[in-house]
Amino acid sequence: MLINDLNIKIYRINIMKNISGKAALLALGMISTSAFASHWSYQAEGAPEHWGELDEAYKICKSGMNQSPVNIDTTVKAHLSPLETHYIDGPVTLTNNGHTIQASEKADTRDSITLDNQNWTLQQFHFHAPSENTVHGKKYAMEMHLVHKNADGELTVVAVMFDQGAANPELDKLWGVMPDRVDQNVTITPNLDMNKLLPTDKPTGALAAL
């Protein structure tokens, strides 16, 4: 996943009891490359250091200065505007895309965030288990990426790191209907309360990697 043109903010959350069972499909999907000859992965021939060689569309991965996955190992004291979330509708469908489980929004969704005085509409969110990125070399049990887009088509991704902890009812809704097969779509009923997937304490001085 290229982050050269993405604004990444990373938060930490502690709401997971475990990631066994169906959640393990997230990890399996990421390392399975047999069905996706030119698709990226995290190991062997599809590992990040080879992404630029897999396909012409990925060639920027050879020269990108902020290529994901990243290890955030520098602490910077920053005074950033608070991240304002406006999650109302919740996602509509879950899709197993072969790399991860992705939740997609309906076209007229009202779910959005306000960042740098701009409105960014939530397009989709997906999971990586274990986390795709690291903080001071530490991998977390799971990482959620919430992908947003503004009126100019620019993207902002909010990343939430999960530690093991108490069970979360909203995550249980996802695990209960998680699609087992690649390209399988599942409708989420009832809608998810996105706010309960976020940490209650969202620091205003979040780490930014650009």
Image: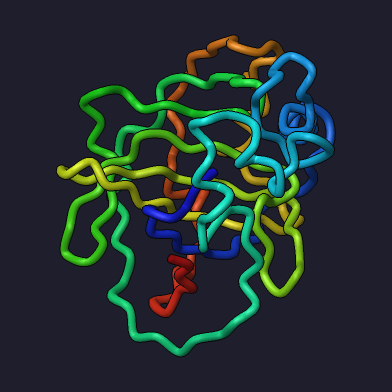
Q: Is residue 118 above or below residue 136?
A: above
Residue located at (33% from left, 78% from top) = 80
Return the x and y of residue 163 as percentages of the image width and height.
Answer: 72, 59
Return the x and y of residue 47 as percentages of the image width and height.
Answer: 74, 42
| 71 relative to 58 in the view: left or right | right
Residue located at (61% from left, 38% from top) = 171
**Number of numbered discs overlaid on the protein picture:** 0
Colouring: rainbow
Q: Is residue 48 above or below residue 179?
A: below
Instruction: Locate the C terminus and report the quarter of the image it occupies.
Output: bottom left
| 200 relative to 32 in the view: left or right | left
Return the x and y of residue 16 as percentages of the image width and height.
Answer: 70, 50
Outermost residue on the bottom side: it is 77
Residue located at (60% from left, 41% from top) = 52
Residue located at (55% from left, 19% from top) = 95
Return the x and y of residue 146 as percentages of the image width and height.
Answer: 45, 45
| 94 relative to 155 in the view: left or right | right
Q: Nearer the viewer, residue 13 or 80?
A: 80
Instruction: Locate the N terminus and report the quarter of the image it occupies.
Output: top right
Occupied quadrant, residue 205:
bottom left
